[in-house]
């Protein structure tokens, strides 16, 4: 019993850290300014329509949940970090979207079995540390014949490489935690879902990002607004040499990824995996 209590306490502490990570900075503005259309891409791929009961897992400020609601679906936007909801509520009200917002851990969703027609996540569930637990929950709350849809950054793409650049400077992950970009690997997602899904469709796509004037602008934007980047910089705040090295690594990443369009801006393409399937049974 003591070991069980210890494990539960460790999990609560880990989730508290994750919630705090995403609450800092300004992820809602980043999502709105840098990747505003990705949620709608996922909603379209899932065939969301009027009358469907939809759950967005790791919804953040509603990048996918709001387009789903605007398509006429009955939507619940869930996230471990409810601090992100206020920005989402403002956007939803402005656009005339009606949906529910609920705090929820992707690894222990507070919903009944087979409760939703569509369960989706746009660069959200990929950040749950225990991938199999999160995948099991996606399947559990989706009705048989319903759709599971995921949009995740790939390991080989720009954001996957950014996490690789951050890793040497970050605190070691807790035991059992897996890297978020693994959700962008088709084989990994197929293994997580197994024979519980059918009609799998997986496609690598890219989104063009031309928000940043220079590689330094990209770095400074992510240092200010993106929770995972902020967390790593905080961990090395007392180490100026390592901080300078990470500064340089992020600038190099953006410089290497620049498409060189001649526009006078740093133009990047970020790769993601668009994955949809139907729950078997």
Image (cartoon, helix red, strand yellow):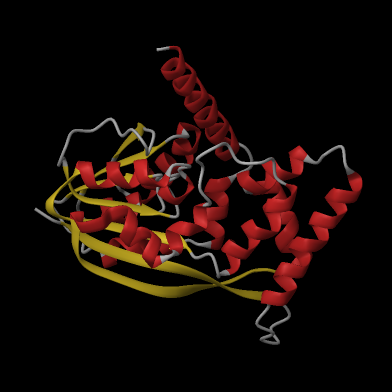
Query: Taking 80 as reference, is 234 left or right?
Result: right
Quadrant in the picture for residue 8: top left
- Residue 18 lies, with reference to residue 149, above or below; the image says above
Residue at x 16%, y 37% (from the top left corner): 113
> Relative to residue 82, is residue 162 drawn left or right?
right
Of the pair 43 and 244, the residue shown nearer to us: 244
Task: Report the label total.
Answer: 0
Of 93 and 162, the residue lying toward us: 162
Residue 140, relative to residue 4: is it above or below?
below
Quadrant the N terminus occupies = top left
Task: Please tell me which residue is depicted at 90% across the width and 45% down the height of the picture.
Answer: 240
User: Residue visible at 13% across and 56% down?
Assistant: 280
Residue at the extreme right: 241
Is residue 98 visible to us here?
A: no
Residue 202 locus on image (x, y percent): 32, 71
Residue 216 pos. (x, y %): 78, 64
Please indicate, yes or no, whether residue 128 appears anywhere in the rendered image.
yes
Name above or below for residue 81 compared with residue 257.
Answer: above
| Residue 57 pos. (x, y %) | 35, 45
Q: Is residue 201 left or right of residue 3?
A: left
Q: Quadrant of residue 218?
A: bottom right
Question: Hey, which residue is sitting farthest top in the picture?
Answer: 2
* Relative to 50, 17 lies left or right: right
**Residue 47 in the image, given as x and y percentages of width and height:** 21, 64
């Amino acid at each position: 019993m003591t070991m069980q209590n210890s494990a539960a306490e460790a999990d609560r502490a880990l989730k508290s850290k994750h919630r705090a990570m995403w609450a800092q900075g300004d992820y809602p503005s980043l999502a709105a300014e840098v990747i505003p259309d990705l949620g709608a891409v996922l909603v379209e791929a899932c065939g969301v329509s009027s009358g469907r009961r939809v759950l967005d897992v790791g919804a953040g400020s509603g990048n996918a949940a709001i387009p789903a609601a605007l398509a006429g679906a009955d939507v619940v936007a869930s996230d471990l970090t409810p601090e992100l909801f206020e920005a989402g509520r403002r956007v939803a009200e402005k656009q005339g979207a009606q949906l529910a917002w609920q705090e929820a851990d992707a690894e222990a969703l507070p919903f009944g079995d087979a409760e939703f027609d569509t369960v989706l996540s746009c660069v959200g569930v990929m950040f749950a540390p225990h991938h199999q637990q999160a995948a099991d929950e996606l399947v559990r709350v989706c009705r048989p014949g319903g759709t599971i849809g995921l949009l995740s950054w790939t390991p080989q793409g720009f954001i996957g490489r950014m996490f690789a650049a951050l890793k040497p400077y970050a605190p070691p992950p807790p035991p059992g935690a897996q890297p978020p970009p693994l959700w962008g690997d088709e084989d990994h997602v197929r293994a997580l879902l197994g024979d519980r899904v059918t009609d799998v469709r997986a496609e690598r796509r890219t989104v063009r990002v031309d928000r940043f004037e220079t590689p330094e602008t990209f770095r400074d934007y992510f240092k200010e607004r993106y929770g995972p980047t902020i967390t790593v910089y905080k961990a090395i705040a007392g180490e100026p040499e390592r901080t300078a090295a990470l500064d340089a690594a992020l600038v190099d990443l953006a410089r290497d990824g620049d498409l060189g369009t001649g526009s006078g801006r740093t133009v990047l393409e970020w790769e993601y995996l668009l994955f949809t399937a139907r729950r078997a049974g």
